[in-house]
Image (tube, rainbow, N blue to C red):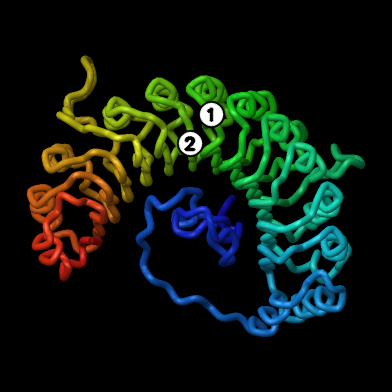
Amino acid sequence: MTSSITNNFANNLNLTNNINNINNINNINNINNTDTFEYKKSSKTKVYKGSKEIESLLNSDLNQNDNINNLLTKIDHYKFKKLDLANKSINNVTLRLLANSPNFSSNIKMLNLTDNKFNEYGMIYLSNITLHKSLESLDLSSNYLTCNMVKCLIPVENVNDKISNLKELILKDNLIEAKGINSLTNNPYFSKLVNIDLSKNSIEDKGLEYIKVNQKNLINLERLNISDNKITKLGMDILNSCSSFLSHLTHLNLSCNKIETEGILKLIINKSFKNIIYLNIKQCQLTIEVLKQMMHSENCLNIKYLDFGGNKLKLGHLSNKNKKNEDKNKFYLQNLIRLSLKSNEINDNDIKSLIKLKLLNNLEYLNLSINKIGKKGVDSLIEEYIDNFSVKINLQGNFELSTKTKHDLENNNKFII
């Protein structure tokens, strides 16, 4: 389903540059996250015909009718599919012009309105924009949106007869509380959403209650970012009870919430968790018991991207022996491609434990920055990866490394120092 959706809302697992490129919502480098997997291969940016003219108009005062009308004319002429209006002081009047413009409604698939100046009336105009069949991605980050403003995003008239074609809705860094989640989910208007980013709001555990009650209206959702939302382990109990909803998810960001070890363990043993490919549990007050459980839980077999950073882990002795009555040879994190253990307390002995577990076998990128790794740990990594030319290992911020060791690594393209 998602292959036709535009390249969405993040830049290399950094939820920042939300609207970039048109064909790649499936690319994991665009998943909601922070700086976990910052390494990526360089790529050339395609320059489209008319880009310079469009850019020139974007730098003008778009709240002047002539400027916005000229912009819309050029968009139609060059058949542009994305419009980045981030931080342009867009007001209600300009939104009304966009909503009523046939040039806009017939072309634009991706609209970025991050950090602008509209209010509830502007949201009403936006509700009309969300009815445009071409629009698939909308970014409303950092607009001080309240619950009432979110409610205005859904058309009032005949709402049950209307379904938005939006596949992606970015509501990061606003003032949305639990009631706003109810407004978004208590009818099928946004039922085609595949990805929703609610990070840096205040939905709390009650917001997950509304998701549970209204989960039938989220049947297509595959990617959910609820990081930094004051969610606790009680919220994990609620999410754990949403078996149907949870079974559709492939990407889940729970970072920067106080969900604790008990909260995440319940999710890991839930069979509905088994479709998760990307999991961010950074800064969630977790212990090593979570990693141990994940290593031996069949429900974690499909995880390829795992962020375990910022949990102050002390790995100690990680055993590869499973619980009683389980196959000793079973190890269920073998498909990891990218792993972050950034900002923990990992030392040289911990590196040896990780290597013995073969936890690092298939990795393309390993983030070990800001830990306590010294020369012995580096030597262990070099020995493990001597024949693996594709892996990148981030060791930045490991102050146990001597100047000589850093110098020796400068010409080794496996390491980021």
Q: Disc 2 marks which amino acid?
A: Leu
Q: What residue sits 48% from the left and 40% below the top?
A: 253
Q: Quadrant of residue 186?
A: top right
Whether residue 416 is visible to the viewer of this picture, yes or no, is yes
Category of crowding for the residue at label 2, using alpha-carbon neighbours closer than 10 angstroms: few (below 14), some (14–19), many (at least 20): many
Which mark is drawn over residue 231? Answer: 1
Distance of mark 1 from mark 2, alpha carbons? 9 Å
Q: Which residue is mark 2?
A: 254
- Residue 126, position in %: x, y? 80, 53
Say what secondary structure mark 2 lies in. Answer: loop
| First of labels 1, 2 by sequence position | 1
Q: Amino acid at mark 1?
A: Ile
Q: Point out the frontmost of discs 1 and 2.
A: 1
Asked which secondary structure carries label 1, the reply is: loop
Task: Give whichever of 237, 115 is nearer the camera.
Answer: 115
**Image x and y of residue 318, in percent:** 18, 30
Pinpoint residue 301: horizontal percent, then vertical percent. Answer: 34, 36
Q: Would you identify the image quadrant in which residue 287 lies?
A: top left
Point 69% across, 45% down: residue: 192
Residue occupying image coordinates x 61% and y 46% = 173
Q: Assess whether mark 2 and mark 1 are in contact (beta carbons under 8 angstroms).
A: yes
Residue 373, image x, y percentages: 17, 47
In this rendering, is residue 369 above or below 6? above
Query: Residue 296, can we see it?
Result: no
Residues packed near mark 1 inside 10 Å, few (<14), some (14 to 19) or many (20 plus): many
Q: Residue at x 27, y 41 (%)?
A: 334
